[in-house]
Image (cartoon, rainbow, N blue to C red):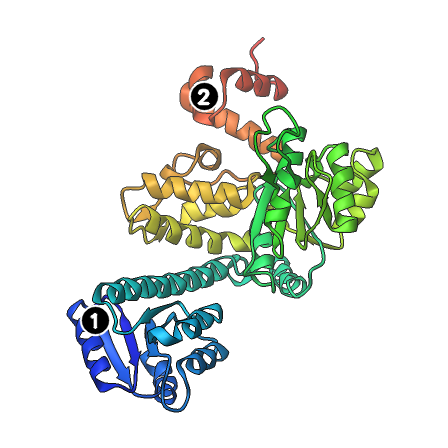
Amino acid sequence: MNNKGKILLVDDEINTLKVLSAILKKNGYDVHVSRTAEEAIDRTPKLNPDALITDYKLPGMSGAELLEALKQKGSQMPVIMLTAYGTIEKAVDAMKKGAFNYLTKPVNHDELLTVAREAVEKSRLMHENVSLKEQLKERHSFKNIIGKSPQMQDIFALIKTVSKSSSNVLITGESGTGKELVARAIHYESLRSECPFIPIDCAALPEELLESELFGHEKGSFTGAYEQKTGQIELANKGTVFLDEIGELSPNIQKKFLRFLQEREILRVGGKARIKVDVRIIAATNRDLESDVKKGSFREDLYYRLNVVTINIPPLIERREDVPLLVHNFLNKFNKANNKAIIGIDSDAMKAFMEYDWPGNVRELENAIERATVLCPTDTITLKYLPKAIRRMYSEDNHKVEVFDLMETERRLLLKAFEKTSWNQTKSAEILGISRKQLRTKMKHHGLLPE
């Protein structure tokens, strides 16, 4: 079978069916025919054609009624109308009701092939878009946020609940815990999933640029505003705006954003007309906003507007049981990305992962696995390929130093390094992954500097 596309021809004239079928088949199309609209409706679900070409005048249901029936069944398949010169106005009317195009009889062969090609291309593009949206939705689904710990299971349940509403959500947690991933999961599980999800980093832009980015601006409203700009909030209409690092908003932007939340209207910089916008706001911060409110650096009224539902993501150190799952998930990801076939991680490397405190949280763990996957030449990742910060917690024979408390651990590490280097400070600093100046500070702190 050819691969140019599948077309269903509908006409009660046998000669027309023969001629058009021959032209399309000769040019690589898979062609099926029906003599009535009713037959075409019955056959469409099984055939699943890329496009349908139908005569406007048919016995029983007309071509226009066939189009309407397919639309009512949810079909988005392009439909091309065949019509005589005397009924062109009816074909034009059918196009207003959703027909893809029309051809007049007798059909010009080149026009037929051109319109057929365009219809099949449109059909395939629609299928690809649907497929991509489903993949995107699945990719960010809360079901794919990795975690078996009780804390993460509670978060999964909360995501499922809040996704059904349009209430504002405030996501809190340390940097690297996955706040944007949770925000995307909420969006793609919600009724707004077919509409835009637009992330904005509030800490990345100065105040004057951030205001324009959020609300847009009119041409000539400030130096450099050479044309009108639509703001991100307006672009996200019917969808979701994710404001990362919301605590970094300046007092002026806080005031304007609060007004937007109250009135659900935006005013472009330099503009006079207020624009109604329907968006859901999901904000995130690694700051203690309650403390900022008490200090007066963050508006109390804005805080309560944003904090309708709070989701707090715990740091990785508080859910160590999730580490093995995350390790293997990232290993699969980077195996595919780097065309590797690493099958696992040895026990000492996994112990190092389990005992490390992960100040950078899940993001740091992901980076560590990516690094190890790229560097490891064998099918098993060992301590050798882990970052220094994780590796230095282990002795040369790959066993972790016994930990009593933080101070004792640091002292033991210093002494081990000095033992290996005969108290050479430069080499000891290199082993520990710190500068010589930092090493001398730690030596002084632990009483190890020579008189």
Q: Please indicate whether residue 275 sits to the left or right of residue 130 in the image.
A: right
* Residue reaching furthest to the top: 451
Outermost front residue: 86
| N-term mark: 2 or 1 | 1
Which of the two residues, 159 or 446, is positioned nearer the viewer here?
A: 159
**Residue 201 drawn at (x, y percent):** 60, 39
Helix, strand or loop at disc 1?
Answer: helix
Report whether 392 appears left or right of 170. left
138 versus 205 height, above or below = below
Identified by mark 2, the residue type is: Ser
The percent coordinates of residue 356 (x first, y second) are: 53, 42
* Residue 352 visible in this rendered orientation of the protein: no
Q: Which residue is mark 2?
A: 428
Marks 2 and 1 in Cβ contact (< 8 Å): no
Closer-to-camera residue (278/420): 278
Q: Is residue 161 above or below residue 240?
A: below
Viewer-nearest residue: 80 or 258: 80
> In the picture provided, is 112 more to the left or to the right than 205?
left
Q: Position of residue 199 (x, y in %)?
A: 58, 45
Q: Residue at 55% of width from left, 16% of height from top?
A: 440
Side of 320 where 64 appears, left or right: left
Q: Residues within 10 Å of mark 2 (few under 14, many from 20)?
A: many
**Mark 2 secondary-structure assignment:** helix
Q: Which residue is mark 1?
A: 24
Amino acid type at image mark 1: Leu
**x and y, in percent, of residue 225 in the image:** 60, 29
Q: Residue at x 34, y 50 (%)?
A: 335
Q: Quadrant of the C terminus?
A: top right
Say which of 154 and 189 sits in front.
189
**How many callouts does the rendering have?**
2
Residue 191 seen in the figure: yes
